[in-house]
Amino acid sequence: GADYAKPTPVGRFDITADFYHNDGFYWDPANQVRQPTYSLYNASLGWMNPPGHFGMRLWGKNLGGAKYYSYAFAQSLGEDFSPAPPRTYGFTVSLRL
């Protein structure tokens, strides 16, 4: 990950980015249910006013749109998977009194 902040007369700007790579693994001891290889890219751009009371942040997670599982397991009737969140993005406003 990386984080860069730049103070300016109109407030503090910061940008963050991180990368996560998983080479795959088996969810069960019998090596039947496999999680394939995937990579995640996340980033955000933020601004905080000079007194530090008000801020805004634009963020995105899983920007590459990787398809992976939050959990998986084998059972007698087959395998059960739950997909992890897809590409998500948003805007956050903060207020500190």
Image (cartoon, rainbow, N blue to C red):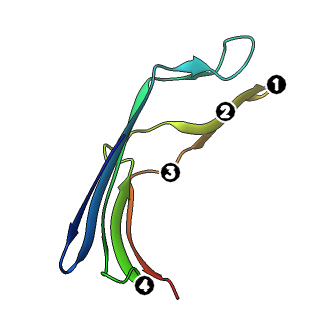
Residue 59: name its quadrant.
Answer: bottom left
Q: Name the residue under label 4.
A: 53
Query: Which badge, 2 or 4, is on the more N-terminal residue?
Result: 4
Category of crowding for the residue at label 3, using alpha-carbon neighbours closer than 10 angstroms: few (below 14), some (14–19), many (at least 20): some
Q: Nearer the viewer, mark 1 or mark 4?
A: 4
C-alpha span from label 1 to label 4: 55 Å
Query: Which badge, 3 or 2, is on the more N-terminal residue?
Result: 2
Q: Which of marks 4 and 3 is in front?
A: 4
Q: In this view, does 80 lie above or below 7?
A: above
Q: Which residue is drawn at 39% across and 47% down?
A: 62
| Res. 58 mark | none
Q: In the rendered view of the protein, which quadrant contains the N terminus?
A: top left
Residue 57 shown left or right of residue 96 in the figure? left
Name the residue tied to disc 1. 76
For this orientation, the residue located farthest to the top is: 30
Instruction: State the count of labels.
Output: 4
Q: Is residue 88 above or below residue 96?
A: above
Helix, strand or loop at mark 1 = loop
Label 1, residues with CA under 10 Å away: few <14, some 14-19, many ≥20: few
User: Which is closer to the viewer, label 3 or label 1?
Assistant: 3
Q: How far apart are marks 2 and 1 (CA)?
A: 14 Å
Q: Mark 2 points at which residue?
A: 72
Kind of residue indicated by mark 2: Ala
Residue 31: tell me if it is visible: yes
Mark 3 or mark 1: whose residue is earlier in sequence: 1
Q: Hey, what amino acid is under mark 4?
A: His
Give amino acid for label 1: Ser
Disc nearer the start of the sequence (1/4): 4
For the residues labelled 1 and 4, say whether their Cβ atoms are less than 8 Å apart. Answer: no
The span from disc 3 to disc 1 (Cα, nearest Å) is: 27 Å
Residue that carries the numbered disc 3 in the rendered image = 85
